[in-house]
Image (cartoon, rainbow, N blue to C red):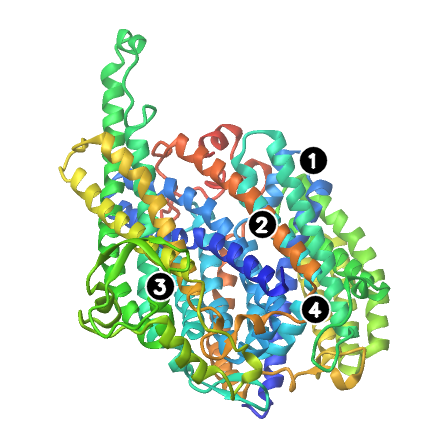
Amino acid sequence: MELVDIARWQFGITTVYHFLFVPLTIGLTLIVAIFETFWLRTKNPDYLRLTKFFGKLFLINFALGLVTGIVQEFQFGMNWSDYSRFVGDVFGAPLAIEGLLAFFLESTFLGLWIFGWDKLPRLVHAACMWIVHLGVLASSWFILAANSWMQHPVGYEYNPETGRAELTDFAAVMFNKVQLVTFPHVVLAAYMSAAAFVIGISAWLYVSKRHGGRVATEEEVAAGEAEAIATTARGERTMYRRGIRISAVIMFVSAIGVIISGDVQGKVMTEVQPMKMAAAEALYETEQSCAPFSVFTIGTPDGQEEKFALTVPCLLSFLGTGSFDGEVKGINELRETYAETYGSDVGATYYTPDDYVPNIPVTYWTFRWMMGFGALGTAGSALVLWLTRRRRDEVVNAAWLGRVGIALPVVTVLASSMGWIFTEMGRQPWVVFGLMTTERGVSPGVSIPEAWISVITLTTLYGVLAVIEVKLLAKTVRKGPEEFVEPPDPGRADHDDDAQLTFAY
Amino acid sequence: MFGLELTTIWFVLIAVLWIGYFALEGFDFGVGMLVPVLARDETERRVMINTIGPVWDGNEVWLLVAGGATFAAFPEWYATLFSGFYLPLLIILVALILRNLSFEYRHKGDTASWRARWDVAMIGGSYVPAVLWGVAFANITAGVPIDADKEFTGTLFTLLNPYALLGGAVTALLFATHGAMFVALKTDGEIRHRARALAVRLGAAAAVVAVVFLTWTQVRTGDLSSAVAFVLAALCLLAGVAAAAAGREGWAFLGTFLTIVLAVAGLFLALFPDVMPSSTSAAYSLTTTNAAATPYTLQIMTWVALVFTPIVIGYQTWTYWVFRKRISTRHIPTAQLTAARD
């Protein structure tokens, strides 16, 4: 393998892995903040128990999201130094601002939230998690602005003297039209993922024989404990149902937003990266109007020849242009257009003449899987809302709630990963669309053995950490939420500030 | 802006970010390094780890912002440095990953072997970056082989020269001293006294090695300003050690804090106006001008930094105020509570 391939594999592996944790961080900060706020308002112990329980699961996730994020920032310089030199003037600023505005906020206020139960007045404590959420949103804004610039570079000028892209309009980069649709799409999809996570775990606990589904054994019945056990279990189910309802509403509303923003995104993409849209459908020949969308195809992997396809007439035209008889350009025509546009002249040193076509099977299938898993998630959240519709502790069909619940986090995670793989692979061969090909971005000074050491080390380490993380999550979930204990209230005059720490490592 | 070149302002700001990183994460590296030395049992270990519990993450963000700001303000510096120092940075990354996870995951297991494994991650993960950052900065200051295309042409072994290894010893010893001072300041009971006594001994050792290293640096690349910074750094270290010996822990910690601030500032003063001198030819050196971003980018970043850096310093200071109380073994939740929490 060449250096560029190794570096791409590393970027793919580390980024997809990092993004398993990111959506949970974005969404769980919101959901935990909502639970804590509900507790403050209603004084209902259930909400505090949910806050602490999902707070704990969130922190196990956040730890991995944080450490894998450091790798993200370093590997631009390590593996992609020519890319960094070329784009640093434009791309570096959002990264630096992300650190200054968002990372400090997240890390500091999260530390206050974790350790501050016995130090901060209750309102301030809850506010800390809201501030962390703001930090997370700010972080998403800046990093997505940087990514959107790679998809659709704006607000820059190519300077032939310095041989790099130079920033001319910061606001244009911050409010890139790709960014304006990508941000809601990604953040709302993250809300979906985190809500699905809460639903899945709560649903499992709801039906679990050790928690919400607990029934007295024969000995317990004989000992006269049956009623007490049934009451406790009912109380637990009420609590999980609260968590599920809140999350299902968040998930369903977010899903609608994801669909709408995704629809707009498709049209923006057709306009700024027509090849990506053609690749998403493996559409080789331009369709003047009413381009069909194939739900799936059996044929050659590159989509050149099809044996069987299930298609929806005119749908691709609608996805790409907003009109059922809109024209969608095909790969063959676009290849010629791209060759004319990018084949020579300005900044030619930064790109390799190529056929400008991404890997078609990858784009074709990831596009479908993203939408398919997203649709399953949307339907699942609606189903959960329906199953929990009665204002009681009993849901309509607990077994079904358990099944749907377990499936939801899996499909949302897959949808997010597929979306990113699609949009990044669909941009190829470009690293910055129309400006620099990926091949030109790698570090000239890095040797192939060094790159191998790096990718093998990180992949192995990430694999081991995944096992540890899953075990820790499973262990924490099996234990379920702690019993309610009235937390210390540092806002009160009689607060003992020399007691044992409420939380300690 | 303000009569200063924007590139100079950004050189200073990046120096400030690295100074903040070393002065803050320096003590939490030190705490991690000293856990096996200072703590006699599991409860004392937890006392130590909990002194940095609420703050280590915020401390580490200084590194991320330093990296991001270098990328934005001096893209060429970022590109040459990160691709050139490839393997040491990979090792630092792995060490930081394991160390950070050790804080979060160590207390989540019930068995002694689980904790022992995370202790290895924590201790190793603290030593390795403490040494390697010193090696890296010594190399940056002294210069490394860089060609006309701004590419690093050395190997891993180019970086492991005696001067740089001495730099690694200096940072490791300084951070360990700083960590001991912090433990003495933030704990109570026996461990506080042990930490103070150790801080005095470590501080004396650090002073000897640091004086040799800083003198060497001064002779190689220093000017008057760096000489002043180095002399003040040495004086602060001695004052800190004296304060620790006299039982004045606050002053002692301030002493090592300022030592690190001044020593790193001195390195940056010795570096200026280069950012990465080339040992191949002075003509190939990366400087504040030939490695910089455009004035427009620097201007936007300057405004962002001017508005937000004071806010960040403000709320980080507030965190230290919130968690100002000393921790002793009786504050650590007992086994029963631990079981309930896990």
| Mark linked to residue B40 | 1
**Which quarter of the picture shows residue A209?**
top left
Residue at mark 4: B84
| Same chain for the residues under marks 3 and 1 in the image | no
What's under tag 4, amino acid-wise? Gly
Q: Residue at x 23, y 63 (%)?
A: A292
| Mark linked to residue A459 | 2
Cα–Cα gap, marks 3 and 1 = 66 Å
Cα–Cα gap, marks 2 and 4 = 22 Å
Residue at mark 3: A282
What's under tag 3, amino acid-wise? Ala
Q: Residue at x 64, y 70 (%)?
A: A443
What's under tag 1, amino acid-wise? Arg
Q: Nearer the viewer, mark 4 or mark 3?
A: 3
Quadrant of the image containing the N terminus of chain A: bottom right
Q: Chain of mark 3?
A: A
Q: Residue at x 70, y 75 (%)?
A: B151
Q: Chain of mark 4?
A: B
- Would you call the spot at circle 2 few (<14 residues within 10 Å), some (14-19), or many (20 or more)? some
Q: Earlier in the sequence, mark 1 or mark 4?
A: 1
| Mark linked to residue B18 | none
Residue A151 rendering spot, x and y as whole percentages: 41, 72
Are the residues at dot 2 and dot 1 in contact (C-beta closer than 8 Å)? no
Q: Residue at x 49, y 83 (%)?
A: A343
Q: Nearer the viewer, mark 3 or mark 1?
A: 3
Q: At numbered mark 4, what does the secondary structure look like: helix, strand or loop?
A: helix
Is residue B295 found left or right of A189 in the rendered image?
right
| Same chain for the residues under marks 2 and 4 in the image | no
**Which quarter of the picture shows residue B118?**
top right
Are the residues at dot 4 and dot 3 in contact (C-beta closer than 8 Å)? no
